[in-house]
Image: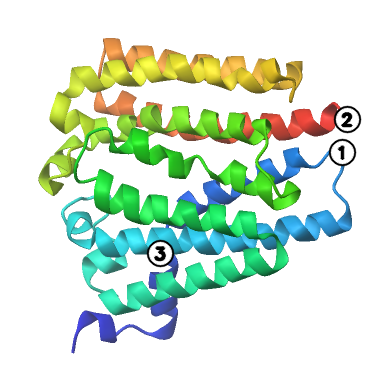
Amino acid sequence: MSVAATASLPSRLAQYYALTKPRVVQLIVFCALIGMVLAVPGWPSGGQLRRMLVACLGIWLVAGAAAAFNCLVEKTIDAKMKRTAWRPTAKGELSDLQALLFSAVLCLAGSAILYAWINPITMWLTFATFVGYAIIYTLLLKPRTPQNIVIGGASGAMPPVLGWAAMTGDVGPEALILFLIIFLWTPPHFWALALYRVEDYRKSGLPMLPVTHGNAYTRLQVFLYTLVLFAGCLMPFVYGMSSWIYLAAAVLLSGGFCAYGYALWRNYSDALARKTFRFSLIHLSLLFAALLVDHYVTL
């Protein structure tokens, strides 16, 4: 009997849940929620809160579908890497058909929710994000160019745009500023991980920057991107969508990221690369949380 046919129901549910990359999707939904909150002047009404909840559900479903499709397409690559070898598709615990059907059901359910209860533009933008990540990034860019994470980062930067569109029915300049921040944040975040996981990527055959251009070049790119990101993080204040509260948080957090980037460039170690990667997650989470606090404190 095959591995894919022997799991109990709780184990099977856990396997399907793992396919959605829960921690990644949680960050996606959080960033989308920030876009929703910032799009609403003042405190949201009960109806707006319900709209946010439904939009978060729809976005979570489509994001989970994209993650599951990614696990299916990259199962052979995942099996070669310590970081991903545990995934159910890589271990053969779920068949290709099971993973594909699961992804399709999540995508259809999320799209239907967004179309019926939010608005068509949010549904189409979310579906375009699915295509951008699952097809353009995973199938076309990732195996072909070391700039995959830069170009493909556009999909990962979409959540606040989706949130903004869910509440307003359009895409304003504020949403594009939030998009820019995540777009600039993605390369130093991901390359810090790739630096200490370089042997995994070398075995997988993926042309990640540390594999194709070496450790020193990648470290320099991480540092340079943190500098550009610093400037990008000032944009909400410059544009007038936030106050000094956010500015103080942005300067401290982005300055910290730059400091990590500089230290990584000048004196590399795997331990420092791990710390830089972890700090990048803290940076984005607290930066968007600061936007949220600033939005309500300055009402």
Within-10-Å neighbours for mark 2: few <14, some 14–19, many 20+: few
Q: Amino acid at mark 2?
A: Leu
Residue 153 figure quarter: top left
Determine contact: label 2, label 1, CB under 8 Å. Answer: yes
Q: Earlier in the sequence, mark 1 or mark 3?
A: 3
Q: Is residue 181 visible?
A: yes
Residue 138 vertical placement versus 87 (above, below) = above
Q: CA distance from mark 2 to mark 3?
A: 40 Å
Q: Is residue 31 visible?
A: no
Q: Quadrant of the N terminus?
A: bottom left
Q: Position of residue 59 (x, y in %)?
A: 58, 58
Q: Amino acid at mark 1?
A: Gly
Q: Earlier in the sequence, mark 2 or mark 1?
A: 1
Which mark is in front, 1 or 3?
1
Q: Is residue 156 left or right of residue 187?
A: right
The numbered mark at residue 299 is 2
Within-10-Å neighbours for mark 3: few <14, some 14–19, many 20+: some
Q: CA distance from mark 1 to mark 3?
A: 37 Å
Q: Quadrant of the C terminus?
A: top right
Q: Position of residue 97 (x, y in %)?
A: 30, 78
Q: Dot 1 corresponds to which residue?
A: 42
Q: CA distance from mark 2 to mark 1?
A: 6 Å
Q: Amino acid at mark 3?
A: Ala
Q: Dot 3 corresponds to which residue?
A: 18
